[in-house]
Amino acid sequence: MATNLYVGNLPFQVTEDDLRELFAPYGEVVSAKVIMDRETNRPRGFGFVEMAQEAEAQKAIESLDQKDFQGRPLKVNPAKPREPRRGAYGGSYGGGYR
């Protein structure tokens, strides 16, 4: 079963290929994604790596968490499921003023 990992404190110049290369020694990398800012289209300093096997993901966490990568200590841990988005003001849609 594939395991999704959160990778934080990434250098802003890192690419998805860099992430894939960094995690490859620990097992099969299914996907690597650097999260980009919607407005500036620049990296936001974190990303996600999906590993093919849970054991490989655990080995990557143990080896890479707090490891220096291009001058920054990485934060690597299991990714939490994405929560549903809410409206602009944190409430539900509809039900405005009458």
Image (tube, helix red, strand yellow):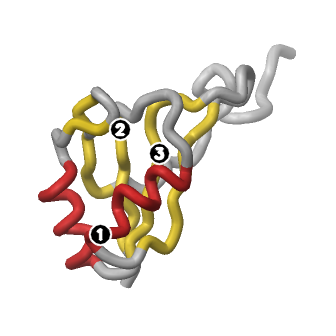
x and y, in percent, of residue 92 in the image: 66, 34
Total marks shown come to: 3
User: Which residue is found at the position 64% from the left and 27% from the top?
Assistant: 42
Relative horizontal placement of residue 95, taking residue 58 as reference (left or right): right
Q: Relative to 37, is 8 above or below?
A: below
Dot 2 amino acid type = Gly
Q: Quadrant of residue 70?
A: top left
Q: Are circles 2 and 1 on residues that touch, CB within 8 Å?
A: no
> Few, some or many C-alpha atoms within 10 Å of disc 1 (few <14, some 14-19, many ≥20)?
few
> Few, some or many C-alpha atoms within 10 Å of disc 3 (few <14, some 14-19, many ≥20)?
many
x and y, in percent, of residue 40 in the image: 71, 21
x and y, in percent, of residue 4 in the image: 40, 64
Circle 2 SS class: strand
Q: Which residue is mark 1?
A: 25
Q: State the CA–CA distance, disc 1 to disc 3.
A: 18 Å
Dot 1 amino acid type = Pro
Circle 3 SS class: strand
Q: Considering depth in this image, is 9 or 92 the residue closer to the camera?
A: 9
Relative horizontal placement of residue 36, taking residue 12 as reference (left or right): right
Dot 3 amino acid type = Gly
Label located before the other in sequence (3 or 2)? 2
Q: Quadrant of residue 11?
A: top left
Q: Which residue is mark 3?
A: 47
Q: Considering depth in this image, is 81 or 73 the residue closer to the camera?
A: 73
Marking on residue 8: 2
